[in-house]
Amino acid sequence: MQLRFPYRRALGSGSLSGRARVWVHQLELDRQLADGVDPASSPALLARARQLQAIRCRQQLAAQIDAALGNAEHPPHWRSVRIPVRAVDVRAARDALCGLREALLACDADGLPGLALAACLLNDPQGPLYQPCNGGAIAQLADEASNALAGRQPLT
């Protein structure tokens, strides 16, 4: 019996330990990519960039937005292991999050900083989706990610 790793070529990381390193450090890598670091500057950044650009990952990010909106309307049971979202803030940012969802599903693989920013927004347990913040932080980050995905410059 032979083990197969179907995403090895797609991720471009070459080894199981390389893929594990990317998985463990994905939030840090996402932050670097969102800041505009060149993915070619390290194998881990390149592998994470390829992951983010895959249609499957963009669909998963869109599904995470759906889940966050659903959790804002119907919080998980108190014994759940899921981190609860900031329901009031998520409901207030509904339009921006829906716009980001549409941008994720409509974009081609360009707009890597926008993809990385969306991943940071959705996956950072210390981010505004899960921790108290100023009122418009979720909407602002969602709008920034949508603009980056669409190739528009952020408003200053």
Image (spheres, grey):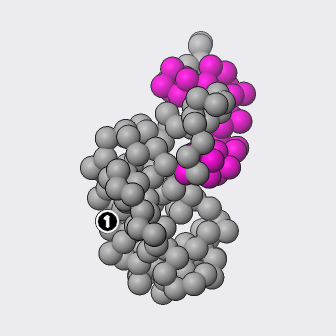
**39 sits left or right of 143 in the view:** right
Could you tell me what secondary structure mostly forms the magenta stretch?
A: helix
Q: Which residues are magenta?
A: 6-34
Total number of numbered discs in the rendering:
1
Q: Nearer the viewer, residue 28 or 78?
A: 28
Residue where numbered disc 1 is placed: 99
Q: Residue at x 41, y 45 (%)?
A: 111
Q: Position of residue 98 (x, y in %)?
A: 33, 68
Name the element at disc 1. Answer: helix
Q: Position of residue 69 (x, y in %)?
A: 41, 73
**In the picture, which quadrant includes the C terminus?**
bottom left
Q: Nearer the viewer, residue 99 or 88?
A: 99
Q: Is residue 28 visible?
A: yes
Identify the image quadrant of residue 99.
bottom left
Would you call the spot at circle 1 few (<14 residues within 10 Å), some (14-19), or many (20 or more)?
some
**48 sits left or right of 95 in the view:** right
